[in-house]
Amino acid sequence: MYRFLIHLVNPILTLINGRAQIVHKDRLPKGNYILVAPHRTWMDPVLLAIAAYPKEFSFMAKEELFGNKFTNWFLRKLHAFPVNRKHPGMSAIKKPINLLKKSDLSTIIFPSGSRYSSKLKGGALLIAKLANVPLVPAVYQGPLSLGALWTRKKRRIAFGEPITIERHKRLDDDYQHQLEEQLQQAFDDLDHELDPSFKYVIPPKPKDDDF
């Protein structure tokens, strides 16, 4: 199902919006890794997964989306797993770690956790350390909604150099802050490389945010 949808959706996006510009795909590791990016549109997981294909990814989705039998089946076929966003618990850490260690699936994580925040959180760092996989920074620039795809504003995605977390080094506040700064600098550098004038404006958060 995952591969089928990649081969279905990518030509449709190309027909509507033109071919995406993908920069530095050669930087993607051969093994598993965590693809981390600023969360700018609900389309991010799809667009990043297509750009990094043939590598396949798992990703977190809020548990409310799994309430319907069909959507539950559909999302799981796409390697999604449910997470309680208000009370994530250890399952939000253990599940991606197990997938990274025991499957061929990498994982997509948005360190800010939301399109309505730019503050990085430490979950991706902890998962990368415990799973012993690198973080790969990425950024997306382009249409932020389905309707905007028809404007022909180009989709651009850039991948950064992998960031390795020292496995035997304690992930204390200082080290976490250092890694977060390195990650944010990577995002800034990639954005500047794609478009020096680019600036993402964080939208106001609606009362019911589905993504």
Image (cartoon, rainbow, N blue to C red):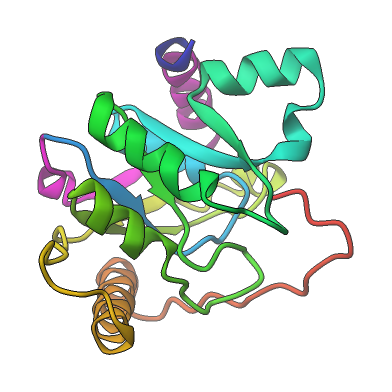
**Is residue 15 left or right of 195 when viewed as pictured?**
right
Residue 129, percent across and down? 24, 58
Identify the image quadrant of residue 176. bottom left
123 or 73, nearer to the observer: 123
Q: Main secondary structure of the magenta part?
A: helix
Q: Is residue 46 visible?
A: no
Q: Residue at x 20, y 60 (%)?
A: 160
Residue 98, percent across and down? 34, 34
Identify the image quadrant of residue 54. top left
Eyeballing the image, is 76 above or below 25? above
Eyeballing the image, is 57 above or below 188? above
193 or 89, nearer to the observer: 89
Identify the image quadrant of residue 86. bottom right
| Residue 6 is one of the magenta-drawn residues | yes
Residue 125, percent across and down? 32, 64
Q: Which residues are magenta?
A: 5-30
82 or 41, nearer to the observer: 82
Q: Residue at x 47, y 72 (%)?
A: 121
